[in-house]
Amino acid sequence: QRRRRQPTTIVPLPYQCQCLGHAMNSVRFQQKKKKPTNKGFFRCTLVLLTSAAVLLSICTLVLSWVAIQIDHTRKVQRGGNSDIDVSHRESPHKEPRLRKRNDINNGESSKILEVVAETKSEVQRKTKVDSHKKKVVSDTTPKGGNRNSEIYQPAQTGKRILTYKRFGGRLNNQLFQFITALQHAKVLKRTFVVPNEVRDVDWTGMFDGFGIWDLESLNNAYDIDWTTGLSIEFVTTVPERCVLTPKEGKELLNGGPNLWEEWDKRCPDVIDIAGNTGLLFCGKQHQFCGDYEAQMEAYRIYDHIKLSSDLSQYIPSKRDEFKDKGYDELAIHSRRAGEGGYDWELCVNGNARTCTGHIAVGDRDMFCDIRTMKGNCAIWLDLDYQIKAKSALKKAEKQYRFVLASDGTHDWNIDFKGQFIVANNTDWLLALERKISENADPGKLLDTMAVTAIARSKLQRQESLGRMRATLDALTATLLDLFSLVDSKYLLGAYYSTLSLNACLFRGMDRIYDSNMCWILMHPENKHAILPPLQESVNMNDKNRNQDDHLPAALMSDVEHAFVRSDDGNFVAIDRYLVRFKGKDVIGVLGDGLVPISIMKNSNGEESIQADFTCSYGDDHDSPATVILMKGHQSHNEHYFVLGEKYNTPFSTNGDRFRTLIILCEKLRYDRSLSRHPPLILKSKDGFSLTIGSTFQRPVGQVTSGKTSDRKNENEKSLVHCLNPVYGLKDPRFVIEYLEYHRAIGVSHVHIYNVDMHSKELQDVLQTFRDEGFITRHDWSEKASRGYTTRKTYEHAKWAAQTDCALRTRGIYDYALFSDIDEIAVGGKSGTNTNYPDGHLAPALEMCEEAKIMRRKIACSFNSNTVSSIYTKLTEEEELALKDNLILERYNRIEAKPYCPANCKCLGNNCAEISRKFHTGRQKYMANVRDLSIPPRPMWTHALARDYDEMDKIMEVLPDEVMHVRHYQGHWYKNNNLLNTMEEKVAPLPVGLMNTVRSSIGNSKDKNKKHTKRLIYTKAMDSASSNGIEWIKTVERDPKYHGKITKR
């Protein structure tokens, strides 16, 4: 360096490398000032070496950080590990979001810092990353970096077989169970023996030769034995110690090589992973077991499972008639109250449990809000909000075109007619049937096709598909639904559904964000789901907003009914039911309107009803129907065809037009083994036609809760309240008191039929009662019922609502009480019976049960007494004094005697005697619903039927001192100007019951431990400007009707 007199040219370097240049220039400066010495030479050498070491360390750290950021960015965008190539899964719609590692050539290395900095900034801007460190679900990889598949090298001893037992369930549960078992076999390096399919619910169609699946790729990729599992001996020879318990099943893959070696020693021949485990989820709902490597093994299996070309051609997006029409843009999986008791509450709670289980705590409010969880169970009510990607959102609902896969009850034609298509397997079935019928020996061909136990049992000695056709129909329809979801650009799926789960897994990791929910379920490397880019997302909940504020009113219900119209529009089917009739389960329909029937009389004048239409269901065609009409005081012909002609409607009306009816298809065979039932078709030769594909409504078990009525002893009869249709209530106070009061007098559960929606406060109240398990809300709004129920026509819908409630509660409760929102039931005094408070209904139920046993009475009626004091306009002093009283306490004066003809019937001259029987006394009743030998029938308002001759034989009339209803109505007094001339008497409700109601309102807490009822009640009471009976308009009355103020 002493010989160099000219400065060396320095090439521009990154900041860290320029440090070396500064150090060298510093050395040169020192050399000019001072002669060099040996000591100076060694000092300069030491500085140079130190600088070089620092530079090398800094550059190493920078390059390591660069590599980590590239890998991290890819993981965030793909939701997976960059070491595992998931981009091989072809997508017909878009390219992968990021390029593969080997696509970055060496020429780009000079720009690497800029690229990484830019990418990191973009990811942080678009994505809200989980604050927890990302880690493998169950990391069993050692520090050396070897995977479990490399560590685990089992000794080749024994047969090394793995199998499972089928637990039943829908087809998609079977697929998930099959793939889970194959995943275990692959990881544990065993041969996978597929078990036989014995029941309809077991059947996947994989064994049998019907041309459903293409499994060539699957069989080439995995060691699968399709033969051994068909043997009965194989099932019975699995040692009990080798059948995993649920706990062992969840621990197996998570345990790693050491645990696997223990199981190899314990069971060298065979392991059964699903003896009692059902769907083997680990950690979270719908998540495979094992570490990242093991979970990815399960994901890869989906690549190898395909439909046959014969069946896949019927996927809607592949059909020529649907191409280039936009139907491939969106696919919707719709479910609510599907088969097998899959009800609204199960759907909503399942959605919430799945969503919150996969998303980190801080992000749950954003993605698992109430509206999303509820609306996902009724997508047609809230379609826009359920779509979570801007790219899939339309400006108006009418712009959507989509493929629909529905296993729920709703008729999408109501709101989206012409906007969607569905998969249709009919042509595939017909082609299969032609192939069989045209064969020289159909029986031999079918024998060749049938491999599984269930197929062989159905096709033995058959020349056609026969009973196997319905099973094939249900299976292939479900598969076409599934692959329709897979084939779409955007999937709007169901969070709590293995059909949607399988669709996500078939779509693959590179398409998880092209869905509302796939990204939530699929995160094999991370503890929680990786959130989608926020600026590409829509309809996320604002944490600062009350979630209930923007919840559509239509989502505040628990039961959706079919409300299917006949082709001519003159008949509406409320629902189809599984009805116990003559000792067997019969397929039935409840409806209202005109159907083709003939009413004939015999020589004795007795009428008989003949249905001029037939029932078809699955393979059973043109089966005879039985029609049950409501009985009246005139002939069936008069009540069904003649009366009520002045009303411009084909349905039941006032004026004794009775068109509410029950249809029973007694000859049809209901197949309990089917997981998806075919539609029921009613059809006549003269053009009447109706198809109803909703779930079979049937009792599936009593709702129980700590907040249902307290039964004093096991002999106490249970009582369900069928509350007639209500609409448009605003003030929540009366409803709170009404429900708490009926709980206090012994009601176990209340069915509420909502014709129109109520105020938000009232909806909140109903939700708290629903959370307690005390009520079930039915959506009978004008929209849901397709115009059947409105505020003007709800009166005639009472008979259909009461009948629906009776059909749903048969066999669950002992008695059903039928009344209106303006009526409360009142029991008698307890007397010496200290088990019940005054006013409790237990003594009335005991008397009714005694009448059934002793006199074969199947129902009991009781009088209605008018609470006339509700019309009294109180003074300011009275309002102030009674402000803190319950509404039920404010109005304790009732009519001293009934007013005829409004509330009784005069007998003899000058009304010397009166009759209050049935409708003449505005009576209400309770009917026995426990005894299934009692035939079902349409239910009238004031008695089981309007035929009083029959009612005298089968109904018991209870005296007022045992039971009656207090009617918070009396327009006949007001309209006839009688309010200042009538007689009233003081009749307060029992103090004990009022204290119970008050205590329940004040002390009950909702599921969030809040006093919701008390807060809503108090707020309504403080802001109330009326007396609380919102359907009543008060008037000035004489002082004698005010009486003495009773203040709490």
Image: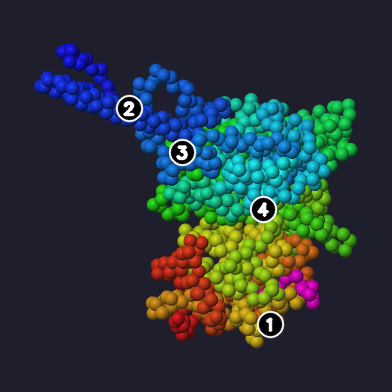
In the rendered image, the quadrant that contains the N terminus is: top left
Q: Is residue 854 located in the magenta-colored stretch of the structure?
A: yes
Q: Could you tell me which residue is drawn at 51 percent across and 30 percent down?
A: 83
Foreground: 644 or 736?
736
Horizontal and vertical percent for residue 218? Answer: 68, 30
Task: Tell me whether circle 4 and circle 1 mark residues in contact (CB < 8 Å).
Answer: no
Q: Nearer the viewer, mark 4 or mark 3?
A: 3
The Cα–Cα distance between marks 2 and 1, rounded to whole angstroms, is: 114 Å
Q: Which residue is mark 1?
A: 913
Foreground: 525 or 954?
525
The Cα–Cα distance between marks 1 and 3, rounded to whole angstroms, is: 78 Å
Residue 56 - label: 2
| Three-letter amino acid code at the position of disc 2 | Leu
Indicate which disc, 3 or 2, sits on the residue closer to the N terminus.
2
Let me know if residue 95 appears in the view.
yes
Q: Nearer the viewer, mark 2 or mark 1?
A: 2
| Three-letter amino acid code at the position of disc 4 | Gly
Q: Nearer the viewer, mark 3 or mark 2?
A: 2
Task: Tell me whether circle 2 and circle 1 mark residues in contact (CB < 8 Å).
Answer: no
Q: Could you tell me which residue is drawn at 62 percent across and 45 percent down?
A: 259
